Amino acid sequence: MKVAAPVFEHHREPLGIGERRPRLSWRTGTDRPGWWQSAYEIELVDGSGTLTGGTGRVASDESVLVPWPGPELESRIRVGARVRVWDAEGRVSAWSPVAYAETGLLGRADWTARPIAPDLGIDPGRPQPVVLLRRAFHTRGPIASARLYVTALGVFQPELNGRPVGEDMLAPGWSSYHHRLRCLTYDVTGLLRDGENVLGAQLGEGWYSGRLGFHGGRRAVYGERPALLAQLEIVYADGSRETIATDERWQAATGPVIRSELYDGEEYDARLERTWHDTEGWGAVTELPLPHTGLESPPGPPVRRTGTLRPVEVLTTPAGRTVLDFGQNLVGRLRIRVKGAAGETVTLRHAEVLENGELALRPLRVAEATDRYTLKGAPEGERYEPLFTFHGFRYAQVDGWPGALDPSDIEAVVLHTDMERTGWFECSEPLVDQLHANVVWGMRGNFLDVPTDCLQRDERLGWTGDIAVFSPAATFLYDCSGMLSSWLRDLAAEQLARTDGAIPPLVVPDALPAGFPNAPTAIWGDSAVLVPWALYQAYGDRELLRTQWESMSGWADELERYVEQGGGLWRADFQFGDWLDPAAPPENPGAARTDPDLVANAYTAHTAAVMAQVADLLDEPEHARRYAQLAARVRAAFADEFVTPGGLLSSDAQTAYTLALRFALLPTARQRERAGERLVEIVRRAGFRIGTGFAGTPLICDALTLAGAPEIAYRMLLETGCPSWLYPVTMGATTVWERWDSMLPDGTMNPGEMTSFNHYALGAVADWLHRTVAGLGEAGPGRRKLRIAPVPGGGLTHARAVHESPYGRCEAGWERDGDTLTVTAVVPPNTTAVVELPDGKPAFEVGSGTHTFTVNGFTTPTWPPTPIRHPFAAPEDTSGR
Ligand code: RAM
């Protein structure tokens, strides 16, 4: 038995945490099968390692998010914790290593610094230059430790003595600045030196005052003047303290960055560089009052550089341009090494795809996605990477490069929230593996501080509906507990600040352009319930449900009102519905085959049912009863309005049947059976092409599996014609697209106004790959209990999924050899799994350890299933694979 160092809350790097009572989680490694923790003991130590308290032996099998055993923490406190555990036989483990955490500034009164904004006469109506802010000071002796507490209205990069502080990018990220501003903590002990020091920061507009949103967007959504708030606290070896805080003693100047915008890119003139020690040419700053917004420590990780890619090919386009192909659609920017004469300008233009051999710029709409670097003429060459911008791209056009371009002088830097990867999948079909890789890349690019979309165009907004459907897959692939719980705080703050009801905004943080009302709509609104629910399933964090309760129940109560008004059903003029159904015309993505009212009410019944469970968990029996009633009422009205007694649905479409089956909206066995058959018929008639948008896509394979037709789900999964999941893969996609046909089969762009090549919503099918194809699902929150239930099929010979749960490594997979099926499962210590083998026998439970099960005489239905084709229809390739 070996216990790993405990984890504080959801922090991988617990410096500057905001929790006064951080919960602790630990994992035990052991070879003993069926291992169960019977007791634990936690010891706390102070910053110097001296024991300060402990729990003694606590008889409990809890090992995830265990309540804080010490006194409430104050600001700037460093604490350590270690754990030991007892097994079921009463044997005790060794102590785990000590894990340390340190709190940030927890109260407003801790801030003596005041935000400062430069007095440089900058026109706030136009893209602003990046401003340099500095303060020189002298240290007065040997230093024991130093911390920098810092945030900005805008985006910042702190520098101490000319060296960047930390590796965070675009800090403090994008939150609902009117409500919450996240403050970062850095250990800068090693960056200080004897004598004169210069603390500085680069400050850009970012989301705070730069252009945001589509249709031209808006500037200054939060304010016109970016400002920096920084507090350097030095503890000297003699115990004395000194604080260097932003105030009117700081100085400001512009530097080489003429503008740096999220959508349009950065313009950098290296001839304008200055050093922090320059004393000439600095102007004054204005001290501003501490903003009214909450000053918080971040619950999740920052955005960082998470990788680099080299060009795989240098292309010369028909127009004679030089274009680099990085072989992967990614989010980030370029880093270059260049040598040339002062004043020469290199232009880097980014795009996701090529059309007719040139950069396809139309999908970018009015995002310029262009960085410009003007050389200073350094004889040894110069290096450049923009700081406060990012682009969604696979290709980059390089203009004005001095001399011959050596591709090794340019690399792509990948940026996103620095989450820990926790989920993997592979199977015997390479195209499906590529689809899964595309889902992972799509998630990477679109998890850039907020769960967002369309990193290439003038949008990049936290659309709530997208994450509502993608969060089950997301929480499997990466540990997004911290990032998404942070985002949910923004959602709650903005939702609950509304005066017209507790309706979550369509995008969080709310930055919709003028003229786009935040009207209530299913799925997007349901994100208030479905995202915390997915997080609870994945991480077992019940406190999160409590924190979100007001937001969750606020939305559920809204739904109850709509249903009351509609006499049992929510009837609204506006719904996004089954957004981006492939049959919807390019210019009208909401014109889906499934009635938007049907979609809305199906999701309403589901959301209400989830809320009944949440209320139960939180010991709110009154609410639990009310939400269960709401679910029942909507179900009954749904059956009455949208379902025939025989089991057909008023919209005879894939999504309609999917939702009715998956959300248990069909009262009679006869209806359920017929609906399942009908879904199969529709799919066979469609030649196994997908016919679902955002609402149906995540669930159609589940619905087919539930209907006893997994081979039809497999056949859809393996279809390569347009539209299908694999069609983009066959077109060379390396991310999931926004539309099923963002690129048309002839290689041209979809003419619609929204044509992103990097979007996660349609990749939600990965959840089915994990849970059903590989068979790694959950039967209890936090995966305390796994559900190992693989459904082999589709001619695949093996599949496997791996996930790092809060308890440890989980695995499920199978291999097929003729009619012998071997299923393997890894169940982490202190958990169990219910196993449902595809042998028709009852499910059974197993404890932790590695398990192998053999099913002899295993058969699947005849493969491949046949399409239903009209004898007079033109022949079409529906062979799939
Ligand atoms: C587009 C995108 C986004 C979606 C909205 C409704 O901007 O497709 O993902 O949520 O529309």
Image (cartoon, helix red, strand yellow):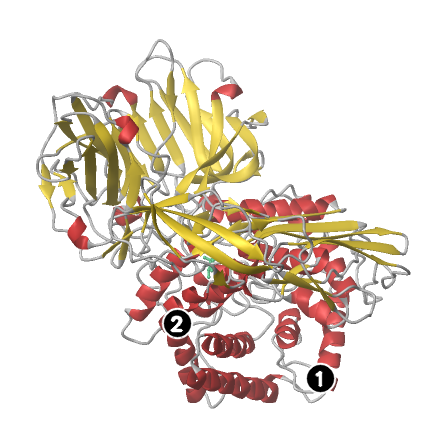
Q: Amino acid at mark 1?
A: Gln
Q: Is mark 2 within 8 Å of ligand 1?
A: no
Q: Please say if 294 is above or below 735.
A: below
On screen, residue 685 versus residue 134, left or right, reads right
Image disc number at residue 412? none
Foreground residue among 74 and 476: 74
Q: Residues within 10 Å of mark 2 (few under 14, many from 20)?
A: many
Dot 1 falls on a residue whose secondary structure is helix
The residue to which callout 1 is attached is: 671
Q: Residue at left 81%, top 67%?
A: 870
Q: On the image, which quarter does residue 651 sit in? A: bottom right
Q: Please say if 410 is above or below 82.
A: above
On screen, residue 103 versus residue 549, left or right, reads left
On screen, residue 55 versus residue 238, left or right, reads right
Q: Residues within 10 Å of mark 1 (few under 14, many from 20)?
A: many
The residue to which callout 2 is attached is: 549
Q: Is mark 1 within 8 Å of ligand 1?
A: no
Residue 451 at least partly seen: no
N-term-proximal mark, 2 vs 1:
2
The picture places residue 672, in percent across and down from the top left corner, at 71, 81
On screen, residue 826 versus residue 226, left or right, reads right
Q: Residue at left 49%, top 17%?
A: 405
Q: Amino acid at mark 2?
A: Trp
Q: Residue at left 53%, top 74%?
A: 603
Which of labels 2 and 1 is toward the front?
A: 2
Dot 2 falls on a residue whose secondary structure is helix
The picture places residue 508, in percent across and down from the top left corner, at 37, 59
Residue 550 at least partly seen: yes
Could you tell me how far apart the alpha carbons at marks 2 and 1 are, in whole angstroms?
35 Å
The picture places residue 515, in percent across and down from the top left corner, at 32, 64
